[in-house]
Amino acid sequence: MLLIQRQGGVLKIFKRIKENDFSEKYHVVFSRIFVVPVFLIAISGAYLTFDRFVIGDLQNSMSIKEEILSDNKYLKFDLISLDKVKKVIYPFSKSESDFYAIELNDRSVMVNQYNNRIYSQSFYPFSYFTKEWFYNLHTGKGNLFLSIILLVSSISILFFIFTGFKISIKSTLKSLNIKYLSSEKDSKYIILVGSEKGNTFEFAKFLSAQIQSFGERVIIKPLNSYKIYNQAETFIILTSTYGEGDPPSNANNFVPLFKKFSQHNKINYSIIGFGSLKYPKFCAFAVNVDSMIKPLDNFDEIVPLMKINRRSVLEFNKWIKMWNNSAITSVKFKPMEIET
Ligand SMILES: Cc1cc2nc3c(=O)[nH]c(=O)nc-3n(C[C@H](O)[C@H](O)[C@H](O)COP(=O)(O)O)c2cc1C
């Protein structure tokens, strides 16, 4: 589901991957390749657990019926082919009360060791066959090709754990490493950030540090924690876009929150969209937010919506220039240095 959502629909699953980072790129590449076998491993594993703790207990309490045969039926060993025999337990002693216990494909039988007469038989219940089917699917028993696929898929799960952990740590560190000078109660500048992997927070931190150097109170908040800010005068909204022009995960609730909380003050605002021109809906979420805010009377635009392709510092500095040229703004930003 996550794969489909992040790719922006089922059909987009087969599109070329546009990520450059190794972990991010191959997390998507391998999840596309292994989605089916990993799903089968998960389903069969879940069934086997269910069987072990629920169906197994149920069967134990009902106990499988063993039918003692009164008529003389004999097991013709020479007519039973080996592929129908799963297990043979030999009699422990020469006593006539010790039987062969033979497990066939559909039932188990107790057979007299001297004359091959079937003493008793018990047929397996339906759940036995489903369990066996899921067990073979889960372990690849009896099928070399399937077991190789399962082996490689299991290794891919370790890869997903490793790269997923790396992506998540990277994004958490980027969003956590924010120093607050002010509380949201007394901040004049509110920087609202929509980000999935934390890159947009880097730009927010850059702006926040400079606003603080002007002695102004500023706070950085994810778009999903939008509320009424009593002292707010300026909003700077920075947001990325994912999938079909969807918000990043920390902004997926912003639109209803924005409609619910109407600010008491007049707000000057500017929106910066972060996206990539490789996607057809370039910065679409930022565009949505812009068209939601623009018509409101108590919101005044400082700089028109700026769409930034692939975190271009050059384009970000263009926004800074426009901001600095605005008569409304008392805080002026230094341009961001371009990494070489
Ligand atoms: C799976 C995926 C889907 C994306 N979809 C879009 C999109 O529809 N439109 C767009 O402009 N950018 C899209 N991007 C690019 C990101 O928005 C861009 O890389 C942004 O800088 C990420 O910022 P963040 O790390 O703060 O979330 C997508 C990126 C990925 C990995």
Image (cartoon, rainbow, N blue to C red):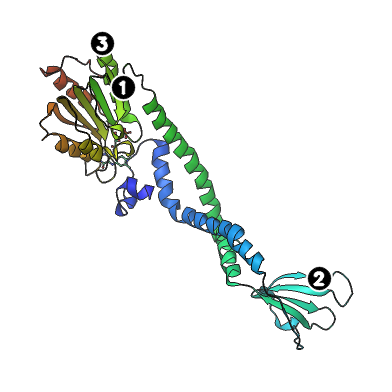
Q: Distance between the residues labelled 3 and 1?
A: 15 Å
Please, what is the three-letter code of the amino acid marked with disc 1? Lys
The residue at the far bottom in this view is 71
Label 1: element kind = helix
Q: Distance between the residues labelled 3 and 2?
A: 89 Å
Would you name the residue on which mark 3 appears? 215
Asked if the residues shown at circle 3 and circle 2 are in contact, with their CB atoms under 8 angstroms apart, the answer is no
Please, what is the three-letter code of the amino acid marked with disc 2? Tyr
Would you name the residue on which mark 1 appears? 205
Left/right placement of residue 221 relative to residue 116 reads: left
Please, what is the three-letter code of the amino acid marked with disc 3? Gly
- The relative height of residue 149 versus residue 58 in the rendered view (above or below) is above
Q: Residue at 35% of width from left, 31% of height from top?
A: 198
Mark 3 vs 2, N-terminal side: 2
- The relative height of residue 53 versus residue 307 in the rendered view (above or below) is below
Would you name the residue on which mark 2 appears? 90
Residue 52, image x and y in percent? 61, 58
Residue 327, image x and y in percent? 10, 17
- The relative height of residue 10 versus residue 243 in the rendered view (above or below) is below
Q: Residue at 50% of width from left, 46% of height from top?
A: 157
- Disc 3 packing (10 Å; few <14; some 14–19; many ≥20): few
Label 2: element kind = loop
Q: Which of 240 and 152 lies nearest the eye of the viewer?
A: 240
